[in-house]
Image (spheres, grey):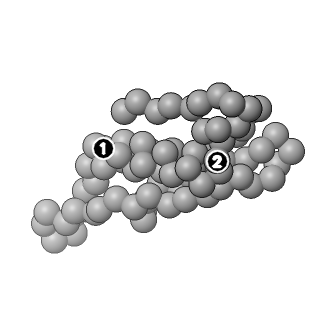
Amino acid sequence: MTYLLARDFGAAGNKAALFCPDGTLAASVIATYPTYYPHDGWLERDPNDWWDAVATSTQELIRRSSIDNYGGTSVGITV
């Protein structure tokens, strides 16, 4: 089965959703990441935190949607 994965990288974190081919929501999750304020008026984010959020949210989407056991096949993620 094919799924559609949608992501939104916002100020609070990576919002991710997994949809079935008919448009039904299979699962959604938000993986947050920190914001750093090194100086007054400055705002920074670490790209490694974004990548961690992608990995975490993808794994959680698969867990929540139970697609890892769909049709007797396995879905694996390597980070």
Between circles 2 and 1, the one closer to the viewer is 2
- Amino acid type, mark 1: Pro
Q: Residue placed at 28% from the left, 43% from the top?
A: 48
Q: Is residue 8 visible?
A: no
Give left or right: position of 69 versus 79: right
Nearer to the camera, 27 or 64: 64
Residue 71 quadrant: top right
Q: Tell me the quarter of the image containing the N terminus.
A: top right
Q: For the residues marked 2 and 1, what is the alpha-carbon distance in whole angstroms?
A: 29 Å
Can you say whether 44 is above or below 20 in the image? below
What percent of the width, then of the height, locates residue 2?
74, 32
Give left or right: position of 14 versus 62: left
What percent of the width, then of the height, locates residue 42?
21, 63
Any mark on residue 20, and which? none
Give left or right: position of 36 versus 18: left
- Amino acid type, mark 2: Ser
Give left or right: position of 15 versus 11: right
Q: Residue placed at 80% from the left, 53% from the top?
A: 24
Q: Residue placed at 60% from the left, 54% from the top?
A: 64
What percent of the width, then of the height, locates residue 49?
30, 49
Can you say whether 21 is above or below 12 in the image? above
Q: Residue furthest left?
A: 39
Q: Is residue 44 visible?
A: yes
Q: Residue placed at 47% from the left, 54% from the top?
A: 14
Whether the residues at callouts 2 and 1 have beta carbons within 8 Å, the answer is no
Residue receiving disc 1: 47
Residue receiving disc 2: 66
